Image: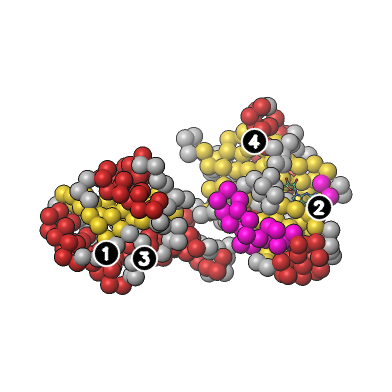
């Protein structure tokens, strides 16, 4: 689970990493008020879970509270790489003398963590890494030893970071370990004109597998429920019902049974010139209830224009799936067309159940290709 910058910086702060004073709001008026409190001149920053906000115009300096309000009005609602900006962070501006790049990432192949650091941080770090790889140090970290002061000094030396960054490097490791993160990244970590070291940006990816021992994730911690946007709350709903739901950015909703079938369904839909809006794997042995829950989740996604239910009955019998669809139609008001392809175990019985129900928005197809083409056409006709 990725955190928003303002959530990640909260974790940094708790671990003693210095960050600029800031607050979050979802209105232009709120931005003006925060700017007033912070002394007038501020940086207004889009809060979206993607990088490159600066280059997209999502990070702007405002000279006074009135300008902060205006800037927030421009940034709120902006689309950055498919993410709608719903909140802005308003922060005290910092006088930057130098920008550094620092991150710890899990190196799965090596079974270790990796420190990546550079004295040439900032918005062009990808270019620096591509054109001059020597300017970016990559130091393996033994997870059992972690980042001690000595290790931090080694990282700083390798990346030509000033000695004052050693303390931050140790604390950042602390964030990774104590908060169960898979990634922590600071770009830029800056030295101010006054010689202070500050984290000006914060990126943290938490390890979802650690949820059981991080009770606060669900409550007041970095992932408060009210911060979840639509897609995420759907993911949470699906998770609570034991469903594997993933949000994508197209227009065809996809339900299938089994990871393999779902993956090939995505491919076939893409092959028909449409893009999957999401997918949900109801798994093997899925009951009518699971099908009903799944359809409810998929239909709640506003991006969905049509739904493709692709089931190959093995352990899951197609008549149970058909029963689930019929049951779902009783509870969910269907507003989008659904194309169903049932094959395998009890397919004929399943098709008969759906035929008998005669819902005007539900149609059946006998082949996977035919069904995908139909779902794509329906999505585009919408
Ligand atoms: P990103 O583009 O999504 O990584 O967003 P960042 O938070 O890293 O901001 C982009 C750039 O804006 C940074 O690399 C800085 O150069 C600049 N920036 C952010 N905050 C401040 C600030 O307080 N003062 C100044 N002068 N520049 C800032
Ligand atoms: Mn950044």
Does the residue tagged 1 have its C-beta within 8 Å of any atom of ligand 1?
no
CA gap between label 4 and label 2 equals 23 Å
> For the view shown, which residue lies furthest in the right direction?
194
Q: Is residue 350 depicted above or below 327 in this figure?
A: above
Q: For mark 1, give the secondary structure.
A: loop
**Residue picked out by circle 2:** 94
Q: CA distance from mark 1 to mark 3?
A: 10 Å
Q: Nearer the viewer, residue 158 or 263?
A: 263
Does label 1 or label 3 sit earlier along the sequence?
3
Colour style of the rendered protein structure: secondary structure
Q: From the image, tell me which residue sits under label 4.
A: 126
Q: Residue at x 69, y 37 (%)?
A: 124
Residue drawn 43% across and 61% down?
Answer: 301
* Residue 46 in which image quadrant: bottom right
Depth check, mark 1 against mark 4: the one in front is 1
Locate residue 321, reporting x and y percent: 22, 60
> Residues under labels 4 and 3: Cα distance?
44 Å
**Numbered badge on residue 360:** 1
Q: Nearer the viewer, residue 327 or 140?
A: 327
Quarter holding the C terminus is: bottom left
State the mark number for residue 335.
Answer: 3
Mark 2, secondary structure of its residue? loop
Q: Which mark is residue 221?
A: none
Read off the magenta span. Answer: 71-96
Q: Are marks 1 and 4 in contact (CB under 8 Å)?
A: no
Q: Dot 4, how many residues are within 10 Å of its Cα: few (below 14), some (14-19), or many (20+)?
A: few
For mark 4, give the secondary structure.
helix
Q: Is residue 181 magenta?
A: no
For marks 1 and 2, give the one nearer the viewer.
1
């Amino acid at each position: 689970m990725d955190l928003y910058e303002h959530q990640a910086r909260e974790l940094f702060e708790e671990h003693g990493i210095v960050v600029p004073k800031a607050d979050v709001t979802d209105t232009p008026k709120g931005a003006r008020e925060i700017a007033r409190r912070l002394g007038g001149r501020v940086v207004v920053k889009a809060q979206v879970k993607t990088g490159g906000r600066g280059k997209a115009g999502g990070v702007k300096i405002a000279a006074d509270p009135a300008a902060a309000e205006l800037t927030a009005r421009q940034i709120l609602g902006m689309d950055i790489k498919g993410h709608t900006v719903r909140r802005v962070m308003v922060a005290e501006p910092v006088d930057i003398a130098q920008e550094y790049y620092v991150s710890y990432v899990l190196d799965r192949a090596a079974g270790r963590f990796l420190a990546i650091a550079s004295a040439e941080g900032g918005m062009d770090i990808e270019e620096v890494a591509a054109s001059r790889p020597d300017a970016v140090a990559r130091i393996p970290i033994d997870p059992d030893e972690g980042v001690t002061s000595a290790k931090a000094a080694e990282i700083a030396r390798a990346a030509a970071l000033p000695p004052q960054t050693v303390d931050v490097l140790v604390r950042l490791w602390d964030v990774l370990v104590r908060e169960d993160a898979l990634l922590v990244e600071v770009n830029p970590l800056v030295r101010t004109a006054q010689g202070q070291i500050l984290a000006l940006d914060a990126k943290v990816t938490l390890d979802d597998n650690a949820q059981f021992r991080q009770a606060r994730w669900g409550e007041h911690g970095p992932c408060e429920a009210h911060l979840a946007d639509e897609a995420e709350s759907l993911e949470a709903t699906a998770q609570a019902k034991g469903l594997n739901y993933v949000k994508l950015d197209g227009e065809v909703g996809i339900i299938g049974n089994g990871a393999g079938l779902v993956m090939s369904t995505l491919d076939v839909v893409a092959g028909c010139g449409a893009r999957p809006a999401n997918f949900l794997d109801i798994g093997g042995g899925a009951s009518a209830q699971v099908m009903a829950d799944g359809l409810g989740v998929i239909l709640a996604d506003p991006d969905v224009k049509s739904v493709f239910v692709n089931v190959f009955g093995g352990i899951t019998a197609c008549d149970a799936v058909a029963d689930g669809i019929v049951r779902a139609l009783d509870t969910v008001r269907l507003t989008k067309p659904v194309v169903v392809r049932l094959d395998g175990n009890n397919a004929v019985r399943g098709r008969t159940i759906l035929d008998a129900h005669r819902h005007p928005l539900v149609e059946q197809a006998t082949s996977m290709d035919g069904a995908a083409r139909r779902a794509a056409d329906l999505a585009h006709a919408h």
